[in-house]
Image (cartoon, rainbow, N blue to C red):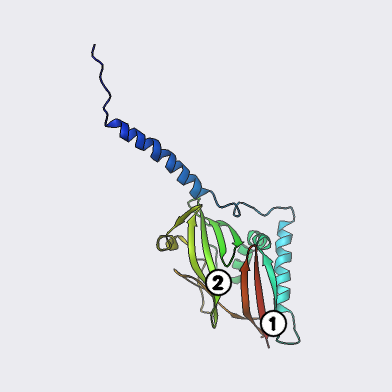
Amino acid sequence: MECTRPDGRRWPLRRLASFVLPALVVITILSLAGPFWWRLTPDGGSLKQQGNDIEQRVVSRLTKVRDSEEPWGFVIEDDIANVWLATRLIPWLEHDGDLEFPDGWTDPRIRFGTDVIQIGVRSPWHSVVVIDLRPRLELESVIFELVGISIGWIPVPLAMGASMVPEFGTSDGHGPEVSMDGLSVPRTFDLADGRRVRIEDLEVASGELGLRFRTLR
């Protein structure tokens, strides 16, 4: 009885499949898994109260009546910022009225690196989108330049990835302006009593954001 030899052309396809399938699995895992800092979820039974306290402290510093127009400031650590994001971002957006968190996007986290702010958000298709923003001061605006985008651990070209970044609402001309290049925020904003606060300087370092302001009468 003559044995039938296997078709030699099938072996390259099998080898290709044995490489492609595991590669697809790895790519899927890397795209769904956020970076290590995104997976550090704020916890604690008093988390909501912590978020309220953080917001009240910041508001108190911003609205404090000062005897002069000398610069003043404070430092925000990224773990503190993430507590606020987890507990107060959505209520704050709802109270503002002009901005809203996009449907299907959840679990925002932030990380302050060296000269770069990273923001990670769970997307509607379950992967974690990470955007890298580099802040700089211009005459009347703070520009957060879009310098990098990743899907999970996988970097993607800016031209492709910018379309994946969600719009967090609309601007009335006095608030943030979002474009394909990043985010623009006015350097000066009004307080309820008629005073104005101007951002004089900001510095992003590992784990923290330093801000300096000037209160204008």
The image quadrant that residue 157 belongs to is bottom left
The image quadrant that residue 194 belongs to is bottom right
Percent across and percent down for residue 44 are: 72, 53
Q: Work out whether residue 102 can be spotted.
A: no
Q: Nearer the viewer, residue 192 or 117?
A: 117
In what quadrant of the picture does the N terminus appear? Answer: top left
Q: Does residue 128 sit above or below 72 in this rendering?
A: above
Q: Position of 173 compared to 51: left or right?
A: left
Q: Residues within 10 Å of mark 2 (few under 14, many from 20)?
A: many
Percent across and percent down for residue 178 are: 49, 71
Q: Position of 5 compared to 57: left or right?
A: left
Residue 71's disc is: 1
Q: Which residue is mark 2?
A: 135
Three-letter code, disc 2: Pro
Q: Does residue 164 sit above or below 176 in this rendering?
A: above
The image quadrant that residue 106 belongs to is bottom right
In what quadrant of the picture does the C terminus appear? Answer: bottom right
Q: CA distance from mark 2 to mark 1?
A: 20 Å
